[in-house]
Image (spheres, rainbow, N blue to C red):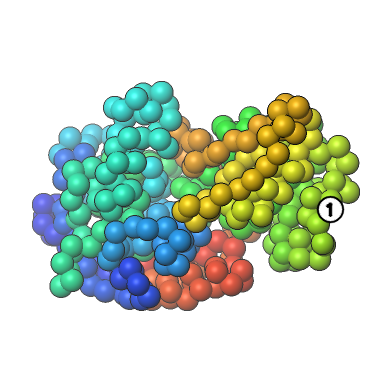
């Protein structure tokens, strides 16, 4: 192994900002102060990556994709004493600085350094990238870039977890599970015996279903257009399902199951139609939780008088309102206790070379959570 202050050459999936994802040799610089290097065991394929390649979201390019993953620490930078080589970690796409007002209030998903530097600039904290090749500088995606054999991330972006957990499977804890279960627990605070609907049964939606089951909801209605996803939702805790492709009116179909509307509805898709459906199907005092992220600039409409008169709420949920250092190890513990089923949510494992095809399959609705295995 080269000295920890030397760059290494890795393979990574690079999006050029226009049309092409290519597997390229990339130089990965050594971790700087407060940073760690991680050998990636698995990277989850998420709609947030797809939003980049379809240009629904504007990010700096060229960029190494991927924001969900797990791996093993291979090097630590100066000043890092809570992690050491060999630690198993889950990667977090909100590497909170720990010092801004939001971080001090235990709202790291609103970290000002992440919002002003890491996410918009495609860099790490200091405004520079650790990635480069013959193209020149290559950007990081959300401070992670897990579609790569190794990554350098801020220390807060690598969450130490127990070593007996299945390292590949727990890759999805860093986004899908933390976002979905967190939306139920942290954002909404779902109470026992509540009625819940989840619109969209991809990785995040299925995590919402599992979170609602663990919260003790009495009815959990899953909505999707893919029969196989609805069947899996039942396995993971849904009591009822609605095939949105087989009904004319999703709101009416939801009310056929729970006539007086729902206590909580989670929009795990983020389309304007699904957001409006979530609001329209609420019951008295209900909360619509927007978990799926729409393209930039989209606008939804609702009846504010009806919302006020029914004492309803619309809640935004970024990263499940999670505190990664607290929530991710706890979620991994719940996986090991048998309370959370990750294996059923993983629909395939693919080599890094198939990154583009994995995103195409996700866009076509053929896949749940696929894993890229960069070092296979």
* Left or right: residue 193 compared with residue 6: right
Q: Which residue is mark 1?
A: 253
Q: Estimate the x, y position of residue 111 in percent, counting from the top left.
A: 36, 35
Q: Residue at x 85, y 46 (%)?
A: 255
The foreground one among 221 and 298 is 298
Q: Residue at x 57, y 45 (%)?
A: 291
The foreground one among 58 and 240 is 58
Total count of labels: 1
Q: Estimate the x, y position of residue 60 in percent, counting from the top left.
A: 29, 59
The foreground one among 61 and 208 is 61
* Left or right: residue 87 compared with residue 29: right
The foreground one among 347 and 300 is 300
Answer few, some or many: residues within 10 Å of disc 1's Cα (few below 14, many 20 plus, some between 14 and 19): some
**Quadrant of the rendered image containing residue 230:** bottom right
Q: Classify the position of the N terminus by image quarter.
A: bottom left
**Quadrant of the rendered image containing residue 245:** bottom right
Q: Is residue 229 visible?
A: yes
Q: Is residue 27 above or below residue 119?
A: below
**Quadrant of the rendered image containing residue 280:** top right
Q: Classify the position of the C terminus by image quarter.
A: bottom left
Q: Residue at x 30, y 34 (%)?
A: 97
Element carrying mark 1: helix
Q: Estimate the x, y position of residue 295 in percent, counting from the top left.
A: 49, 56
Q: Is residue 268 visible?
A: no
* Left or right: residue 239 compared with residue 106: right
Q: Estimate the x, y position of residue 225 in percent, counting from the top left.
A: 72, 64
Q: Residue at x 34, y 25 (%)?
A: 101
């Amino acid at each position: 192994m080269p000295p920890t202050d030397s760059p290494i050459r890795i393979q990574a999936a690079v999006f050029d900002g226009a049309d092409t994802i290519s597997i390229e040799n990339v130089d990965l610089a050594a971790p700087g102060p407060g940073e760690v290097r991680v050998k990636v065991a698995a990277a989850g394929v998420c709609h947030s990556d797809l939003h980049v390649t379809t240009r629904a979201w504007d990010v700096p390019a060229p960029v190494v994709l991927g924001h969900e993953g797990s791996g093993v620490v291979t090097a630590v930078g100066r000043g890092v004493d809570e992690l050491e080589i060999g630690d198993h970690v889950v990667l977090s796409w909100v590497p909170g600085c720990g010092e801004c007002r939001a971080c001090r209030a235990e709202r790291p998903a609103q970290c000002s350094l992440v919002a002003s530097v890491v996410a918009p600039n495609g860099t790490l904290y200091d405004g520079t990238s650790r990635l480069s090749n013959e193209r020149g500088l290559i950007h990081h995606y959300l401070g992670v870039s897990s579609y790569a054999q190794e990554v350098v991330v801020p220390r807060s972006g690598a969450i130490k977890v127990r070593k007996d957990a299945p390292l590949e499977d727990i890759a999805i804890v860093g986004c899908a599970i933390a976002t979905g279960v967190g939306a139920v627990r942290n954002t909404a605070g779902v109470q026992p015996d509540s009625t819940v609907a989840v619109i969209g049964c991809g990785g995040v939606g299925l995590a919402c279903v599992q979170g609602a089951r663990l919260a003790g909801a009495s009815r959990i209605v899953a909505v999707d257009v893919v029969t196989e996803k609805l069947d899996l939702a039942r396995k993971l805790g849904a009591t009822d399902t609605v095939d949105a492709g087989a009904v004319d009116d999703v709101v009416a179909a939801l009310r056929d199951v729970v006539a007086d509307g729902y206590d909580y509805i989670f929009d795990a898709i983020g389309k304007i139609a699904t957001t409006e459906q979530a609001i329209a199907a609420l019951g008295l005092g209900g909360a619509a939780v927007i978990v799926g992220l729409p393209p930039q600039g989209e606008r939804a409409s609702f009846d504010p008088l009806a919302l006020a008169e029914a004492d309803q709420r619309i809640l935004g949920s970024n990263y499940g309102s999670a505190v990664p250092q607290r929530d991710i190890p706890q979620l991994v513990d719940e996986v090991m206790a048998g309370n959370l089923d990750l294996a059923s949510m993983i629909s395939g494992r693919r080599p890094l070379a198939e990154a583009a095809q994995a995103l195409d399959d996700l866009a076509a609705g053929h896949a749940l959570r696929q894993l890229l295995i960069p070092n296979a």
